[in-house]
Amino acid sequence: MSLRTLKRASCSLFGLVAAFAANAAWAVTPSRFNMPPGVTEISQEVYDLHMLILWVCVVIGVLVFGAMIWSIVRHRKSKGRVAAGFHDNLRVEIAWTVIPFLILVGMAVPAARVLVKMEDTRDADLTIQVTGYQWRWRYDYIDNDFGYFSNLSRDSNDARQRGVDIDLTSVDNYLLDVDNPVVVPVGRRIRFLFTSNDVIHAWWVPQLAVKKDAIPGFINEMWTKIDVPGVYRGQCAELCGRDHAFMPVVLIAMTDDDYEAWVAERRELAQAEAEALAADRDWELDELMQRGEGVYMSQCAACHQANGQGLPAAGFPALTSGMSVDPDGVGAHIDMVLNGSPRNSVMAAFGRSLNNLDLAAVITFERNAFGNDTGDIIQPRDIEAARQQQR
Ligand SMILES: [Cu+2]
């Protein structure tokens, strides 16, 4: 490469960088190549911080590479030249220690300010506990005495099971949709408490600039205050096992009135649920089947499939006739679901996350769906008896 082309190349490089820098619109409009500015004060500050540091890096990059390219060109010497024999220059060494130090401090000060603000969870209007499960989230509204699981939506789940032969663009928000989103009011300080039931997960919603680890045995905190009503989506951001990609986060921010109405509805549901649980009565087959199907689709179908055929190649047994627990009867079936498999941790102990009624319902469902038709009806008290037996 001749000197002239080198010079021309470095000029056009500078020109390109200058053109980008001059184009302010490029810097502020949300771009699909950049992180989102988000919908909270904090997320805006995080975004500004990110842009500030990006531009500091751009300037340093231009200066350093510019000086380097200029030196290479300007001080180019022919082959065979004897190199100068000097070493160390105190003044230069002090300069290249002090200047980067000042730049780092200059970046650390605004960054620390934002970090402190993010961690300050005082004066919350509302607290929601977020618990990671393999592979779903649970939201507990501490101030309102209700909580629920949030699972990958059925559309996404069906589509992913069917695999390669399906057009994924036909599924709305593929892998970013859930059955029960977490709901919050706009304009109020919401405190999140993060923990986990099994392994480390991380709750992440980019538009809120909230990303926090959910660690078993620990409680992490973070807060948010959302300005704009809307639906905000995120994902688990910590590799947490086989179905890590299938536990999205969907958060709906509503106006105060809508939120209050939603809370009232949820409380009613929770109340009805508590009453159903407390009622010591015999449940009809129909009732259990209906409830059991819901539980099955949200908790079991990911592995055993919606049609009960399982994925034998992946080690998920079919629950159709010939279930290996079947010859040993209802007791063995309850034991498998309540306590998990004695052979592997893939078939989890659902006794920890489902109540007696849901367990009775899902087991009744499995024993009567998929052509099983055993006619067996399992009551919540049968589950309670199985729990007692282990104590
Ligand atoms: Cu996870």
Image: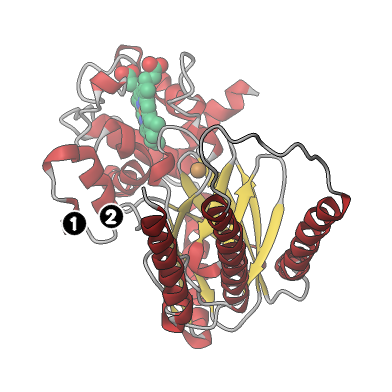
Image spot of residue 276 (x, y percent): 47, 54
Q: Residues within 10 Å of mark 2 (few under 14, many from 20)?
A: some
Residue plotted at (50% across, 73% down):
38
Question: What mark, if any, has residue 169 been given in the picture?
Answer: 1
Marks 1 and 2: in contact by CB < 8 Å?
yes
Residue for point 28% across, 42% down: 285
Quadrant, the C terminus:
top right
Type of the residue with mark 1: Thr
Query: In terms of secondary structure, where does tag 2 sit?
Result: loop
Compared with 199, 2 (above or below) is below
The mark nearer the N terminus, 2 or 1, is: 1
Give the residue number, with chain letter if any, for mark 2: 174
Residue appearing at x 27%, y 18% in the figure: 323
- Judged from this view, the residue extending furthest toward the left is 165
* Amino acid carrying mark 2 in the image: Tyr
Is 46 positioned to the left or the right of 282 in the image? right
